Amino acid sequence: MMKINNTALKSKTCIFLSIFVLSYLFCAVTPVQAETASSNDLPVLVVSAQSTVTASPDQASVSLAVIGFDKDLNKAQKTNNTNTERVIASLLENGIEKENIETSNYTIQPQYNYESKGSDLPEIIGYRVRNEVSVTVKDIDTLGTVLDSAVKAGANNINYINFEKSDTSALEDKALAQAVSRAQSKAKVIAEAADVNIVRILSINEGNVYINPPVPLRYADMGLGGAEGAAKSSQVPIQPGQI
């Protein structure tokens, strides 16, 4: 039974908006150091702010692989094809839409014996076939069952699991509003401390938006355990964390 280390998913990550810059025109009551507008030599106050928002992910991207070996290339391909078809069938049976299943990589690698005697060239001892499938799981609550079924069907490598937010537009809007509010607050504090009056906003410059998902859960954090793992749980435990 495959086990997942939940601690890899518990750290919160975020949508990060930086840097949000507002330029204010103000009237000086006492002299202050400030940038000046080149046209009218008017004092300008420039402030910056940033905002961070977090949210629960609502989908996951998973990379699965079926890996096999055989001395005969045709047999290696046939076995891999059969196992991959079983994995895809298990995904469909667990509610994954066909458009959310995609072949992402397919490789055939000859395996060599570099210690063969009687020849200067290494001996081909077989072929390793790898078929990778990328899956988008729209319902995170079913992710454990989906992974379990895929492994039982023949997936013997899980490259990673990425937790995502399908639509981040509302979160970005929230981050923008928070950044503007913070910039306005900073400008007010500075103006009061410098004993000047803010007249109006001259310009607003939006910075970059960074979306940092939880650290991907990789194959190194998983294991295909034996009877002990199977006795503890019937499916893969999943904790999506925050984005």
Image (cartoon, rainbow, N blue to C red):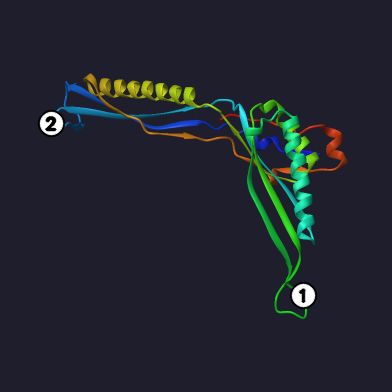
| Residue at mark 1 | 116
Q: Residue at x 17, y 31 (%)?
A: 37
Where disc 2 sits, the SS reads loop
Q: Is residue 186 left or right of residue 51?
A: left
- Mark 1 vs 2, N-terminal side: 2
Q: Mark 2 and mark 1 in contact (Cβ < 8 Å)?
A: no
Label 2 environment density (alpha carbons within 10 Å; few <14, some 14–19, many ≥20): few
Rounded to the nearest whole Å, what is the CA distance between mark 1 and mark 2? 81 Å
Residue 8 at x, y percent in the picture: 65, 38
Residue 75 at x, y percent in the picture: 79, 56
Q: Residue at x 45, y 22 (%)?
A: 174
Label 1 environment density (alpha carbons within 10 Å; few <14, some 14–19, many ≥20): few
Viewer-side residue, 37 vs 142? 142
- Going by the numbered disc 2, the residue's amino acid type is Ser
Q: Quadrant of the N terminus?
A: top right
Q: Residue at x 88, y 40 (%)?
A: 227
Q: Quadrant of residue 25?
A: top left
The circle on residue 105 is none
Image height of 123 relative to 134, above or below: below
Q: Quadrant of residue 61?
A: top right
Asked if one can make out residue 10 in the rendered structure from this viewpoint, the answer is no
Where disc 1 sits, the SS reads loop
Viewer-side residue, 218 vs 150? 150
Asked if one can make out residue 48 in the rendered structure from this viewpoint, the answer is yes
Residue 82 at x, y percent in the picture: 78, 46
- Going by the numbered disc 1, the residue's amino acid type is Ser
| Residue at mark 2 | 39
Residue farthest along the left direction in this orientation: 40
